[in-house]
Amino acid sequence: MPANRPQPDARALALRLLLAVTQDGHMLSDSAPDSADPATRARALRLATTTLRHLQRADAVLAPLLRKPPPPEIQALLRLGVVEMLELGEAAHGVVNSAVAQARLVRGGAAFAGLVNAVLRRAAQTEGWAALPVPRLPGWLRRRLVAAYGQEAVAAMEAAHLAGAPLDLTLRPLPDDARAALTGALEAAASVSTLPGGSLRLAGGAQVSALPGYAEGQWWVQDAAAALPALLLAARPGETVLDLCAAPGGKTMQLAATGASVTALDMSEPRLKRLRANMSRTGLQAAILCADALEWQPPAPFDAILLDAPCSATGTIRRHPDLPLIRKPGDLAALTAFQAALLDRALAMLRPGGRLVYCTCSLLPEEGEAQVSAALARHSDLRLMPLPAPPFGDATPEGGWRTRPDHLTAQGGVDGFYIALLTRS
């Protein structure tokens, strides 16, 4: 953004973010400009994320108040205003005045300023917002999940998506007294609970960089389910370990903290920038490479490999409500083919007797259980290693772990993951 142009306020930026998702099909995380003031950017992302999470409910409020759909910019303004008032509890007069002013800045929007004013004033009088139906997943995705898990489980997942996600922290290995001191300091800043698997969960909003232990690199943000794959791989000091598709680095830091010799590989340099920043803050060490995993040749086979394969990310909808608007059923064929190719390539880089964790943050069996079953059929020297009962979630019929957003519901849920531990004979 040029220096002589004023930066947008949070509502204006949130409007741009909503349109980037609903009109342009861009991910929310890819649309927020780094040049924006950090506080403005954070508030805009919160407004846009909350609006996307409640999009169907906002449309249910607006439908009887509109004779026909307005232009996309005006529709986004109305959706944003409804959610600000009815979900976030913002004062109606401030929201209405801001939306009217914003409408006048949109090309052709001056003609709709009166409509925005009238509709939002009436929407502010809506009763029963909290009783509106829980937003449903897109039909193509819902049908697949119902076939895999049943109606009741899918309804519980949708409720978890609406509730959003709390903040989970993975602590680097610390002496017992140091861990207790850090946990106590975090408890003084926010309500903290320890989850099965060892992650710390913070209730309520918190400024991450202001929390105790952040500057010292004693922890990093990582969903409790996302922490399980590295725990299952159980890297040991001195082992050579490859983290494939490593960015943004939560699993890399877990592996490096074990004392293993870690190589972190990813083909996205912008995502590796975040990984490098995380490694620098924590003081952990890994060889970081930007390369295509299907083409890169390692100097020697690895003792252990973690493959967190690119996927539909349908297990992370509770923190990424833009995903149902972005993902399409036609995406799956290319994704599953790429996952199979990556798994075959990873196995070729693993020494005989070595360990490989395959995981995806997807709820779809074709990206998890079916991928591993197909790999076992392709490779006669491949087998699943026996697993203990998962800390949370379910053991799967073929021998992996499955977590879903409706697991640990009383504690706030977890991301959906599939995880399997494989070895070559």
Image (cartoon, rainbow, N blue to C red):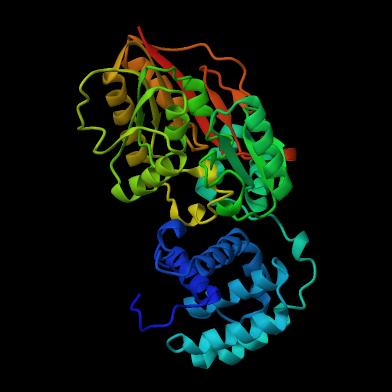
Judged from this view, the residue extending furthest toward the top is 425
Q: Nearer the viewer, residue 68 or 111?
A: 111
Residue 73 drawn at (x, y percent):
48, 78
Looking at the image, is 418 positioned above or below residue 248?
above
* Left or right of 63 in this view: 359: left
Q: Is residue 153 visible?
A: no
On screen, residue 34 above or below 410: below
Residue 411 in which image quadrant: top right
- Residue 65: x and y in percent read 66, 80
Quadrant of the image for the C terminus? Answer: top left
Query: From what the image shows, is residue 111 above or below residue 394?
Result: below
What residue sits 52% from the left and 11% below the top? 386
Percent of width and height locating residue 133: 71, 57
Q: Is residue 375 at all visible to an observer of this figure?
A: yes
Nearest the camera: 371 or 249? 249
- Tell me where residue 385 appears, x and y as whole percent: 47, 12
Q: In what quadrant of the picture does the N terminus appear?
A: bottom left
Q: How many numbered discs sit on the rendered protein?
A: 0
Compared to residue 41, the image places residue 279 above or below, namely above
Q: Residue at x 45, y 63 (%)?
A: 21
